[in-house]
Amino acid sequence: MAMERQKRGMIDESRSFDPKTGEVQEGSMVWVPKPSKSQFGTDWFKMAQTTLKVINQHRKELGLEGIVVFNSLMARLDFQNFIQVSQAEIAEELDMKPSNVSRAVKRLIEHGFVKVGPKVGRSSTYQLHPELVWKGKNPAHFKARETARSQGWKVIKGGKDKPKAITSEEQPDLPFPL
């Protein structure tokens, strides 16, 4: 069904007229642009630059294995930050021993980067902290961040001192509270 294209004349901001019939209509004309497609297709996520600083702050606690496993999890990120993957699959992809992947995942969980979700079959699901990265729509991101905060899910501060939760007062330049 093809729409007939009409040329209308404008009287003022809220009124237009049909030049053939002289009919006047009230209302505003609105341009609705065609949504643009992502150049990345579905392989994308959002990450704050501060996330890289947080990862770097935790480099000693996470070790290279932890950082590489976190990167592998980010590469598999699905909408709402969920990931379904076995540790054996990660170990095979990264050419690591399964025990090293298990240790790295445990550290990521301890420091609040990752949370364990429900099991699907024999594999665990994981969820990355929504303050660090996000794959999904913006309204869902705001809700996920609020849910994480209300559940007490925090990224632990890295460095030489004993681990403690990072507060926004300690790092006021963050674009989001941790």
Image: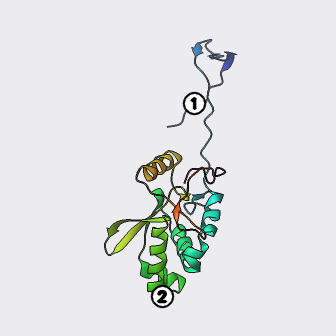
Residue 39 in view here: no
**What residue is shown at x 55% (from left), y 57% (from top)?**
166
Q: Residue 123, position in %: x, y?
A: 36, 74
Location of residue 102 (image quadrant): bottom left
Q: Residue 147, position in %: x, y?
A: 43, 50
| Local secondary structure at mark 2 | loop
Is disc 1 in contact with disc 2, using a CB cutoff of under 8 Å? no
Mark 1 and mark 2: Cα distance apart in space: 65 Å
**What residue is shown at x 53% (from left), y 36% (from top)?**
2
Q: Which numbered circle lies on residue 27?
A: none
Residue 10 in view here: yes
* Amino acid at dot 2: Lys
Q: Residue 172, position in %: x, y?
A: 64, 50
| Local secondary structure at mark 1 | loop
**What residue is shown at x 33% (from left), y 69% (from top)?**
120
* 1 vs 2, front mark: 2
* Amino acid at dot 1: Glu
**What residue is shown at x 49% (from left), y 77% (from top)?**
104
**Which residue lies under the disc numbered 1?**
4
Position of residue 118 in the picture relative to residue 105 (left or right): left
Q: Which numbered circle lies on residue 97?
A: 2
Position of residue 9 in the picture relative to residue 131 (left or right): right
Q: Residue 76, position in %: x, y?
A: 50, 68
Residue neighbourhood size for the residue with mark 1, other residues' Cα within 10 Å, grouped as few (<14), some (14–19), many (≥20): few
Residue 23 vs 67, above or below: the answer is: above
User: Looking at the image, which residue sits at the far front?
Assistant: 161
Residue 61 vs 23, above or below: the answer is: below
